[in-house]
Amino acid sequence: MKQISEVIFFLVALAFGGVHGECDVCNTNNPVACHSETVYSLCINDQPTMNFVTCPADYICTSDVYVCYPSNSSVASCTNSTIDESSQCGICASRNNLYACLNETTIAFCFTDGVPHYESLSYCPAGTVCDLNAESGFCTVSTKAAPSCRQSQWTTPEPTTTTISASTSYTTPIATTTTSPVPTTITTPAPTTTTTPVPTT
């Protein structure tokens, strides 16, 4: 009975587009690529960014409108149970978390936030590979170490610079002083009458 309900659930999920079985490919219904059953990254220009995000506990990565769905109500878009352990693409896992390997020869610096910064890329010299376990530097001769990241099918987004030219004008208001007349009270002395006695004769 349990197997019948699982088959029915799978067929319903398939009918609603929940199963695509594509790993590391940007979805059409949401702007992410699922890399395993629970791990995804955002896509920019239809390319995964390699900034991995994990779905909450008991949720799976899907190609549906919302990325993560409860595992008991949906089917994972990518059925890899984990990311290839030999590949640590885009993960700040070097000594002191200084850098991440984005592919075999591209390095992104992580600074202090644990996230690779795509605006600060560096590249390994010819004949060397990006190695998170390098004893010194970031790259090791390819005959002595395997690359820490083998995701060569991913395209690392190139940093772009956009210059916006705009003229800005500022108007500084001129300070004006308004003087209001101060009300004044003029006191006019009341006319006084002086009576002078007239002499009588």
Image (cartoon, rainbow, N blue to C red):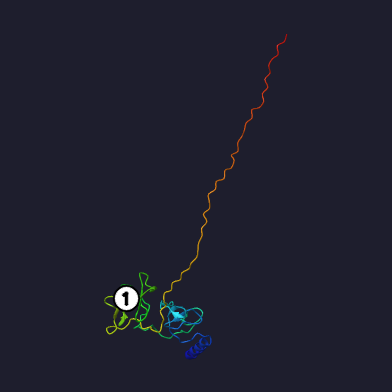
Residue at x 34%, y 74% (from the top left corner): 99
Residue at x 31%, y 72% (from the top left corner): 96
Residue 24, x across and y down, in percent:
43, 83
Foreground of the two, 57 or 200: 200
The picture quadrant where one finds residue 152 is bottom left
Secondary structure of residue under mark 1 = loop
Foreground of the two, 116 or 22: 116
Residue 88, x across and y down, in percent:
35, 80
The residue where tag 1 is placed is: 94
Disc 1 marks a residue whose amino acid type is: Ser
Residue 33 appears anywhere in the view: yes
Above or below, 57 against 193 in this view is below
| Horizontal arrangement in the rendering, residue 67 relative to residue 110 (left or right) | right
Foreground of the two, 173 or 156: 173
Residue 184, x across and y down, in percent:
60, 36
Residue 58 appears anywhere in the view: no
In the rendered image, the residue lying farthest to the right is: 201
